[in-house]
Image (cartoon, grey):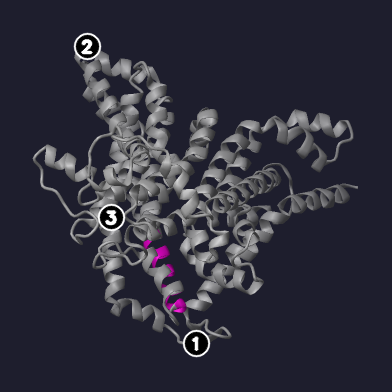
């Protein structure tokens, strides 16, 4: 009787899990194994698909590929600037919103608009604003600042994407901070006040340390997101990563090798693994430095 | 104290302006004539207010309604399937006892860590083999479950009161019957949050359709918009009108459900 009940429960469980297992096997676990296979082969898609074993060639090729180096450098630069900036901005906005002012809800709704809008639409709106004769340059001129050819000048094109993405992702992380801020007990602030702390002291010595686990989460999510930058670069440059490879990211390069040039799909798979390792390393380093792991 | 409040408001208002400007600029450009766009006018109020752009984009590109339909069909189907399947899996992992549970849960967690780029290339080859490139099922089936939300639903069901299920069992309801008739209706807040994120993710997705769909008839909105931009690169009045049309549905959904957004983010954020 007991075993029959157990069998029935297992049957129910696997019935409920069936769709999930089907998708995981066919579109996640299978593909990961397949990707390992691909990364050791040269793949021909013309006519009948053929695979030719090439050993570690695809991996050693990364080291000699100048475009891979450019893409990695662009991506690292992008991550190093965007992640800290968007995290700080999110924290400041959340703390300001949480100060108990009137109209908090209104501001929250407004701030959240970019998060809702598709990357394609946002990129098009910003391309229009970044136009040589566009809004951004007019505003800069108005304040007596230098203007740029945002879309065409290799030295600023990536910065244009950075500004856009900080603007569009900071509000998402702001909401995460906001939820955490509401959990901070008032007694902490009251105690700080008794010790003569001003608003800045309270923010720096109470809020920031209390939020450390959340910050760690926000940074890791930010790292994972920024390392995978693709849509904006693709739309900005029409898929080329230009001008002069300035907006070429690792994922865009993987896309180009996999789908836009012939016979390099295996190499693209190897690059994808390299990127996965870089992301894992970065998140691991982040955890090691922050040492706050209560959240995971 | 007064001064402090004023400076806080200044920050909030300034940032609200920074957030709104791109949208207002796009909206105003969508009502301008091409001459005004080309002249480089910096006015937020159109000189000759016109609705022509909104009419014209549907004449210039007769596929727009088609792209809209494709996006709706794919996003709605993906959302419904995700709600069902993620909840089913989350419930099994939270409440049932069976061999292999730990392993399956570990796999779900591991999937959260794997960047999509690793599976993107083999998925393309698998879909090609199945003949699912350029099809709705190619867009829907691989996206019909989501590890993040399986995890979220598991957390939700773990804290779910057991007594209700026990009462249902006494009434002779099967485990699956209990799940669909008792548990799922009570999971509405978690489902609402999930629905919004899955829908937005699918509606706004750019990379998957870019890889899977090459037939313009089957394009989704973001992809169609990108190809439209390629054809009409200096007609910013058209591009902005098209952008606005495609942003509206999500804004409407947001207007109705915005409280679930915040809840949903704290759900996913609080893991």
In this picture, residue B19 sits left or right of residue B128: left
Magenta residue check for A234: no
In this picture, residue A121 sits left or right of residue A30: left
Q: Which residues are magenta?
A: A265-279
Which residue sits furthest top?
Answer: B2
Same chain shared by disc 3 and disc 1: yes
> Residue B191, percent across and down?
63, 37
Q: Identify the residue under disc 1.
A: A53
**Is B236 located above or below residue A56 in the figure?**
above
Q: Which mark is residue A266?
A: none
Q: Identify the residue under disc 2.
A: B2
Structural crowding at the residue carrying mark 3, measured as other residues with C-alpha within 10 Å and reported as few (<14), some (14–19) or many (≥20): many
As measured in the structure, the alpha-carbon distance from the residue carrying label 2 to the one carrying label 1 is 72 Å
Q: Chain of mark 1?
A: A
Structural crowding at the residue carrying mark 2, measured as other residues with C-alpha within 10 Å and reported as few (<14), some (14–19) or many (≥20): few
Which element carries disc 1, helix, strand or loop? strand
**Is A283 located above or below residue B264 in the figure?**
below
- Residue A82 appears in view: no
Viewer-proximal residue, B232 or B60?
B60
As measured in the structure, the alpha-carbon distance from the residue carrying label 2 to the one carrying label 3 is 39 Å
As measured in the structure, the alpha-carbon distance from the residue carrying label 3 to the one carrying label 1 is 35 Å
Q: Chain of mark 2?
A: B
Question: At x 73% / y 32%, what residue is drawn?
Answer: B162
> Residue A274, percent across and down?
39, 69
Structural crowding at the residue carrying mark 1, measured as other residues with C-alpha within 10 Å and reported as few (<14), some (14–19) or many (≥20): some
> Residue B174, percent across and down?
85, 40
Which residue sits furthest left?
Answer: A144
**Circles 3, 1 touching at the beta carbon (< 8 Å):** no
> Residue A126, percent across and down?
31, 47
Q: Which mark is residue A78?
A: 3
């Amino acid at each position: 009787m007991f075993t029959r009940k157990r069998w029935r429960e297992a049957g129910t469980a696997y019935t409920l899990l069936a769709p999930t297992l089907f998708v995981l096997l066919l579109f996640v676990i299978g593909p990961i194994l397949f990707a390992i296979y691909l990364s050791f082969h040269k793949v021909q898609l013309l006519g009948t698909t053929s695979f030719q074993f090439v050993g570690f060639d695809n991996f050693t090729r990364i080291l000699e590929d100048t475009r891979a180096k450019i893409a990695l450098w662009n991506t690292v630069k992008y991550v190093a600037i965007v992640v800290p900036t968007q995290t700080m901005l999110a924290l400041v906005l959340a703390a300001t919103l949480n100060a108990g002012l009137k109209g908090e809800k209104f501001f929250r709704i407004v701030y959240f608009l970019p998060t809702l809008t598709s990357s394609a639409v946002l990129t098009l709106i910003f391309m229009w604003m970044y136009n040589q004769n566009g809004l951004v340059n007019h505003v800069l001129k108005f304040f007596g600042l230098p203007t740029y050819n945002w879309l065409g000048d290799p030295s600023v094109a990536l910065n244009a994407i950075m500004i856009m993405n900080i603007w569009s992702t900071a509000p998402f992380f702001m909401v995460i901070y906001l939820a955490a801020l509401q959990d901070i007990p008032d007694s902490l602030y009251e105690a700080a006040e008794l010790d003569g702390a001003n608003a800045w002291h309270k923010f720096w010595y109470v809020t920031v340390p209390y939020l450390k686990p959340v910050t760690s989460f926000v940074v890791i999510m930010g790292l994972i997101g920024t390392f995978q930058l693709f849509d904006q670069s693709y739309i900005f440059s029409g898929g080329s990563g230009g001008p002069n490879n300035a907006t070429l990211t690792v994922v865009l390069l993987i896309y180009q090798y996999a789908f836009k040039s012939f016979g390099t799909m295996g190499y693209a798979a190897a690059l994808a693994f390299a990127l996965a390792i870089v992301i894992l390393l970065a998140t691991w380093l982040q955890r090691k430095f922050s040492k706050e792991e209560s959240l995971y | 104290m007064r001064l402090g409040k004023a400076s806080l408001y200044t920050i909030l208002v300034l940032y609200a302006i920074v957030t709104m400007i791109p949208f207002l600029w796009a909206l105003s450009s969508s009502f301008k004539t091409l001459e005004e766009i080309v002249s480089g006018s910096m006015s937020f109020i159109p000189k000759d207010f016109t609705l022509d752009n909104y009419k014209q984009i549907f004449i210039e590109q007769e596929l727009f309604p088609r792209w809209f339909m494709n996006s709706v069909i794919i996003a709605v189907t993906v959302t419904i399937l995700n709600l069902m399947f993620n909840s089913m899996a989350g419930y099994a992992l939270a409440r049932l006892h069976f061999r292999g549970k730990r392993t399956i849960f570990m796999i779900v967690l591991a999937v959260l860590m794997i960047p999509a780029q690793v599976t993107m290339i083999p998925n393309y080859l698998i879909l090609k083999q199945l003949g699912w490139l350029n099809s709705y099922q190619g867009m829907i089936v691989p996206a019909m479950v989501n590890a993040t939300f399986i995890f979220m639903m598991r957390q939700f069901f773990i804290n779910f009161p057991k007594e209700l299920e026990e009462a249902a069992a006494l009434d002779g309801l099967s485990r699956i019957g209990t799940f669909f008739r008792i548990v799922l209706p009570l999971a509405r807040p978690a489902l609402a949050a999930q629905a919004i994120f899955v829908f937005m993710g699918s509606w706004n997705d750019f990379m998957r359709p870019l890889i899977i769909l090459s037939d313009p008839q089957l394009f989704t909105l973001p992809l169609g918009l990108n190809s439209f931009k390629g054809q009409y690169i200096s007609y910013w009045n058209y591009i902005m009108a098209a952008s606005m049309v495609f942003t509206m549905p999500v804004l409407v959904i947001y207007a109705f459900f915005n409280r679930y957004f915040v809840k949903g983010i704290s759900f996913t954020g609080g893991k």
